[in-house]
Image: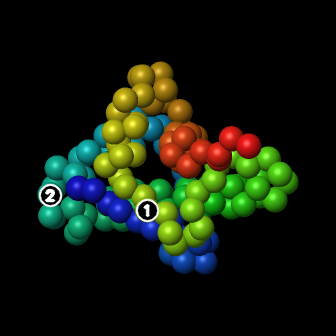
Amino acid sequence: MPVRHRLLPAAAISLFAAPVQAMPVREFIARWTAVGKLGEMAKLDPELRRLTNELEAILEAWRADVDKAKATGKPIACPPPPGQATFDSDKLMAYFKALSPAEQEVELKDGLYAYLNKTYPCPMV
């Protein structure tokens, strides 16, 4: 059940996204996997929308943090311009599942930030 999103500018993210709550990566893996087992029916499950909203809210916050850090001259990541990068949930899940059990206890936001910062490193100058 891959979900591919464009990394959207903040204005394009749903205004109805639920607020991000602390969730460990381990719990996200379990919930995402359970929804994935529904196959095509997953599209009808409200849990998929909740998890997707969670990811979108974190992506929006990450993009804002990237822009802030870039403005201070201390970039944390160098993604393509808004709307040009793609987000592949299969790659994210592979990254999360490869983490040790202790690493899977970090909050989803921290785990996703680590993944994105690793995926979009800044070139060495």
User: In this figure, which residue is indicated by the disc labeled 1?
Assistant: 86
**Numbered tag placed on residue 39 in the rendering:** 2
Among the 4 quarters of the image, the one containing residue 82? bottom right
Expressed as whole percent of the image width and height from the top left, the position of residue 11 reads 60, 77
Task: Name which residue lies at 69% across and 55% down.
Answer: 66
Is residue 1 or residue 108 the one in the foreground? 1
Nearer to the camera, 125 or 108:
125
Q: Residues within 10 Å of mark 1 (few under 14, many from 20)?
A: some
What's the amino acid at mark 1?
Thr
Q: Residues within 10 Å of mark 2 (few under 14, many from 20)?
A: few
Residue ranking furthest to the right: 72
| Mark 2, secondary structure of its residue | helix
Q: Image quadrant of residue 10?
A: bottom right
Residue 88 image position (x, y, % from top left): 37, 55
Nearer the observer: mark 1 or 2; the answer is: 1
| Amino acid residing under circle 2 | Gly
Q: Residue at x 22, y 52 (%)?
A: 36
The single residue placed furthest to the front in the displayed view is 125
- Mark sitting earlier along the chain (1/2): 2
User: What's the distance in space between the residues labelled 1 and 2, CA to CA?
Assistant: 22 Å
